[in-house]
Amino acid sequence: MIKIDLIKNAILDTNLGTLFYDNKPKAYLNLAKEQILIVGVEKQVYYKQLIFHDLLRDDIVNKDEELIALNGDPNYLLIDVIIFYSDIYLAYINSIKDNVLKEKLNNSFHGKDRIVELKKLLIASNLIDEFYIFKDKYITVEAINWCISNNIEFER
């Protein structure tokens, strides 16, 4: 049985700050070892991202293997969840009940430096912790949906 956090972290790691989805790293679940294999990215860049985002963990195995070598291997399953962080931000903004605040957040999100400005407004409005809880739940749902669609038994 796979821990859902393992899948969640793989989704985060492969979508972390990635703007060009054709060059993003790929995460594979090793079914036998219950580990995540991250391939398709330079280790140095990847580790910088992980350290920057405080996500360096023991459950990740990094190798410079070709993606082709994994294709068809029944022990590896591609975790092919793509998350656009803009979708998370917009979903959170739409969940706000206060229409005035919702409009402010929406305007900041669509302006210049949108993520920076939105985060500043979330902090000023004392909503940043609420947003991170929302984001965690959003990614958890994505991880659970991936497990269900791939017939992977999971636990929280």
Image: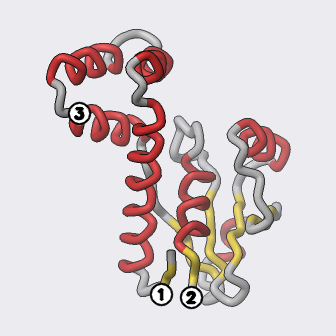
Name the residue rendered at 69%, 89% in the picture: 32
Q: Nearer the viewer, mark 2 or mark 3?
A: 3
Bin the neighbour count of mark 2 within 10 Å (Cα to Cα): few under 14, some 14-19, many 20 and up: few
Q: Is residue 36 shown left or right of residue 91?
A: right
Q: How many marks?
A: 3
Q: Nearer the viewer, residue 17 or 132?
A: 132
Mark 2 near mark 3, Cβ–Cβ under 8 Å?
no
Q: Is residue 119 shown left or right of residue 58?
A: left
Residue type at mark 3? Ile
- Relative image position of residue 129 (x, y in whole percent): 47, 36
- Relative image position of residue 123 (x, y in whole percent): 47, 21
Indicate whether 131 appears above or below 6: above
Tell me the quarter of the picture where residue 8 sits: bottom right
Helix, strand or loop at mark 3: loop
Mark 2 near mark 1, Cβ–Cβ under 8 Å?
yes
Kindly identify which numbered label has been placed on residue 1: 2
* C-alpha span from label 2 to label 3: 36 Å
Bin the neighbour count of mark 3 within 10 Å (Cα to Cα): few under 14, some 14-19, many 20 and up: few
Q: Is tag 2's residue or tag 1's residue first in the polypeptide sequence?
A: 2
Outermost residue toward the right in this view: 44
Indicate whether 73 appears above or below 93: below
- Relative image position of residue 83 (x, y in whole percent): 43, 49
Name the residue rendered at 45%, 66% in the picture: 143
Outermost residue toward the front in this view: 126
Indicate whether 19 appears above or below 136: above
The color scheme shown is: secondary structure
Name the residue rendered at 18%, 26% in the picture: 98
- Relative image position of residue 26 (x, y in whole percent): 61, 59
Residue type at mark 1? Glu
* C-alpha span from label 1 to label 3: 34 Å
